[in-house]
C-alpha cells in the first residue's frame, strides 16, 4: 500500500513497500528495448550531433 507525503499541502513523494516497488520495476522494459520497438526504428533519422559550438548570448 502506498502513502502520499505532502509538503505544505502539495503532494511531493510516495512511500510504498519494497514488494510494490519491485512489482513496478519488473513491469518496465529497458530504454534500449523501447527504442528498438519504436515505429521509427527503420526511418532515416539523422542522429549526428551538431558540432557548431556554443550559441551566442542573447540580451533580454
Image (tube, rainbow, N blue to C red):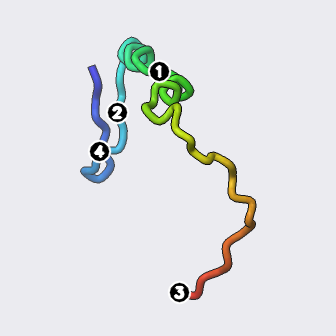
Q: Marks 4 and 3, Cα distance to the nearest angstrom?
A: 35 Å
> Looking at the picture, how far across and down is residue 47, in whole percent?
63, 46
Q: Which residue is mark 1?
A: 29
> Looking at the picture, how far across and down is residue 53, in whole percent?
74, 66
> Looking at the picture, how far across and down is residue 42, in whole percent?
52, 32
Figure disc tally:
4
- Identify whether 13 is placed above or below 55: above
Q: Marks 2 and 3, Cα distance to the nearest angstrom?
A: 39 Å
First in residue order: circle 4 vs circle 1 = 4
Q: Residue at x 29, y 44 (%)?
A: 11
Q: Which residue is mark 2?
A: 14
Q: Marks 1 and 3, Cα distance to the nearest angstrom?
A: 43 Å
Mark 1: few/some/many CA within 10 Å (<14, 14-19, 20+): few
Q: Which label sits in the foreground, 1 or 3?
A: 1
Q: Nearer the viewer, residue 26 or 31?
A: 31
Q: Which label sits in the foreground, 2 or 3?
A: 3
Q: Is residue 57 left or right of residue 23?
A: right
Which residue reaches farthest bottom? Answer: 59
Q: Nearer the viewer, residue 2 or 48?
A: 48
Q: Which residue is mark 4?
A: 11
- Identify whether 2 is placed above or below 58: above
Which circle marks residue 60 in the picture?
Answer: 3
- Identify whether 34 is placed above or below 13: above
Q: Is residue 11 left or right of residue 48?
A: left
Q: Residue at x 56, y 27 (%)?
A: 32
Q: Do residues under tags 4 and 1 come within 8 Å of each other at their CB atoms?
A: no
SS for tag 2?
strand
First in residue order: circle 4 vs circle 3 = 4
Question: Which image quarter is the N terminus in?
Answer: top left
Q: Marks 1 and 2, Cα distance to the nearest angstrom?
A: 22 Å
First in residue order: circle 1 vs circle 3 = 1
Q: Marks 4 and 1, Cα distance to the nearest angstrom?
A: 27 Å
Amino acid at each position: 500500500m502506498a502513502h502520499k507525503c505532502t509538503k505544505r499541502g502539495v503532494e511531493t513523494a510516495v512511500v510504498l513497500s519494497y514488494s510494490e516497488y519491485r512489482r513496478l520495476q519488473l513491469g518496465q522494459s529497458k530504454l534500449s528495448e523501447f527504442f528498438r520497438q519504436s515505429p521509427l526504428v527503420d526511418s532515416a533519422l539523422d542522429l549526428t550531433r551538431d558540432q557548431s559550438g556554443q550559441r551566442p548570448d542573447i540580451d533580454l
